[in-house]
Amino acid sequence: MIPVLIYWAAIELFQDDVVIQSWQIVVAVLIVATSWLTQLQIPLGVVRGACVLILFLHMLKIVVSGEMEDLIADRRRFRRWFLAWLLTLGIITTVIEITHLDQVLPYWVFLLQASAICLSAAAFLVWSVRVAPDIWIEHPSASQRDTTPNPAQAALIKRIEAAMAAGLWREEGLTVAQMAAKLGTQEHRLRSAINQGMGHRNFTSFVNAFRIHEAQTMLEKPEMVERTVLSIAFDVGFSSLGPFNRAFRSQTGMTPTEYRNEALFRVE
């Protein structure tokens, strides 16, 4: 269960909009099932190893690819520690399995390995709950903390809002670094303002909020009923229909087509 639990923890921590797909469930079930069958002398170790590798590589992709979009400073720093720990654990485990040391090593070595994983998990839980609770999506005391921005941050927030109202969100491939350069501020200050001052955890979701709002306006207009959802997605800056549908549903709770039908029904 350890590879599956580590993977699950990673996607819950590093992805703000978690959607479990069927292939992930199948791979996880195969890992657990083949582990038991291998103990019964059924040679499925290669299948299990391949499944673990799939989850491992996907987890690395999530950790690495999301760093630039992450607006939470503590979580961005932890990505690097998590990646280093994950690579170290993976390398050690792989070396032991390839060299068949697992067949000759004394039992206390495996006890030490299990203890190290347990202590690592315990240390992370203490840190994530007591030191850096904001890395999680929900935290009971979040609404009780003073989130009033300081004067410098408040001024930056006004500049951000003005730039986005002027259509900066329309720029294809807009990044945190590009936006910081356009506003003449430092990247870490921009991240902090959008996260702490405006309540967004991810830069892409921040930009998408403006794009979806514009899409809603277009979908509500009877004169645009002949426009396809795909063409509207392109107009507001999405490169394909899938990400647009997911972002739209995440923000509104319904698909673009459902939203359009409901909006036009109200007009009638």
Image (spheres, grey):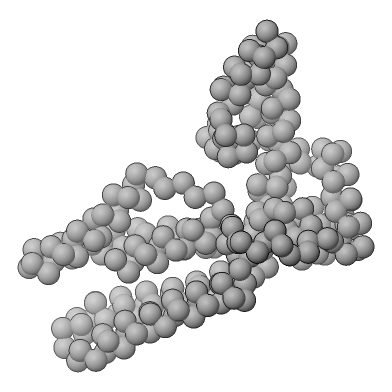
The total number of labels drawn is 0
Indicate the position of residue 15 as horizontal and vertical percent values. 53, 55
Residue at image point 13% right, 62% down? 37
The residue furthest top is 268
24 versus 265 height, above or below: below
* Residue 178 in view of the camera: no
Indicate the position of residue 101 as horizontal and vertical percent values. 21, 85
Q: Tell me where residue 99 sits by quadrant.
A: bottom left
168 displayed left or right of 138: right
Q: Where's the N terminus, which quadrant?
A: bottom left
Indicate the position of residue 26 as horizontal and vertical percent values. 28, 49
Q: Tell me where residue 212 sits by quadrant.
A: top right
Residue at image point 79% right, 57% down? 197
Residue at image point 55% right, 28% down? 255
Q: Nearer the viewer, residue 211 or 128?
A: 128
235 versus 159 height, above or below: above
Q: Where's the C terminus, which quadrant?
A: top right
* Residue 117 in view of the camera: yes
Q: Tell me where residue 232 sits by quadrant.
A: top right
Residue at image point 49% right, 80% down? 123
177 displayed left or right of 254: right
84 versus 53 height, above or below: below
106 displayed left or right of 218: left
Indicate the position of residue 4 as horizontal and vertical percent values. 34, 62
